[in-house]
Amino acid sequence: MRRTVRPPRRRRAQSALLVCLVALALAVAWRVAHDDGADTDPPEPGSAAAVVTAVVDGDTIKATIGSDRVTVRLLGLDAPETPDGCGARAATDRLRELLPAGTRVALVQDPVSDPVDRYGRLLRYVETGGVDVGARLVAEGLAGVWWPKSEPAPTRGAAYEATEAIAATTGTGSWSSCDQLGR
């Protein structure tokens, strides 16, 4: 009689975690692939409708809310800053593709994070057509997850971290050539 050898529980738990991460990545990828860019979803509570006027770099945009001009730092992520930083150009170029001037967006404030950073920029999730642009950059391997560790984690922090883990593990985007993104 042949005896079936079962992997240790730790390996089964790791396998289950990997399956969950792959499922999350597939869900994000499906949402990204099926985004038509139309801004048909109403803004959620705690958000403001805005129009993008410029992309500053891979994690910062300029926008208008009514007649007010604002600078917005995408919450929960960090893209390489300097022009010669590994992946900086790719992150900035991709954000310009996703949010060209004139794009209508929802600027969503996190209920637990600071609303403004130390430079006076609004800290917001940026959504267009119901798609979280920051999550998309992380899924595409063009930005890393970051927030001040002295602050409470943003509500989308865990989802961003899971998405980043998949991108890093699979060598997606700049993870194929950079040790770390945005840090």
Image: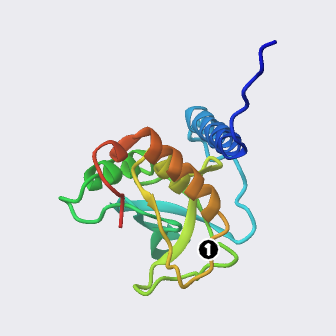
Residue 67 visible in the current orientation = no
- Local packing at callout 1 (Cα closer than 10 Å; few below 14, some 14-19, many 20+) is some
Q: Judge left or right: residue 76 versus residue 8.
A: left
Residue at the image point whose x is 52% and y is 45% from the top? 166
82 w.r.t. 17: above or below: below
Q: Of residues 183 and 10, which is closer to you in this image?
A: 10
140 w.r.t. 80: above or below: above
Q: From the image, tell me which residue sits under label 1.
A: 153
Residue at the image point whose x is 42% and y is 47% from the top? 141
Q: Position of residue 46 (x, y in %)?
A: 71, 72
Q: Position of residue 44 (x, y in %)?
A: 73, 62
Q: Of residues 57 and 55, which is closer to you in this image?
A: 57
Q: Within the image, what quadrant is residue 54 found in? A: bottom left
Residue at the image point whose x is 62% and y is 33% from the top? 30
Quadrant occupied by the C terminus = bottom left
Q: Position of residue 85 (x, y in %)?
A: 23, 59
- Extreme residue in the left direction: 84
Q: Judge left or right: residue 101 versus residue 34.
A: left
166 w.r.t. 61: above or below: above
13 w.r.t. 122: above or below: above
- Extreme residue in the right direction: 1
Q: As shown in the figure, which amino acid type bears the numbered disc 1?
A: Ala
Disc 1 is placed on an element classified as loop
Residue 153 visible in the current orientation = yes
Q: Within the image, what quadrant is residue 155 found in? A: bottom right
Q: Of residues 5 and 31, which is closer to you in this image?
A: 5
Quadrant occupied by the N terminus = top right
Q: Position of residue 102 (x, y in %)?
A: 45, 54
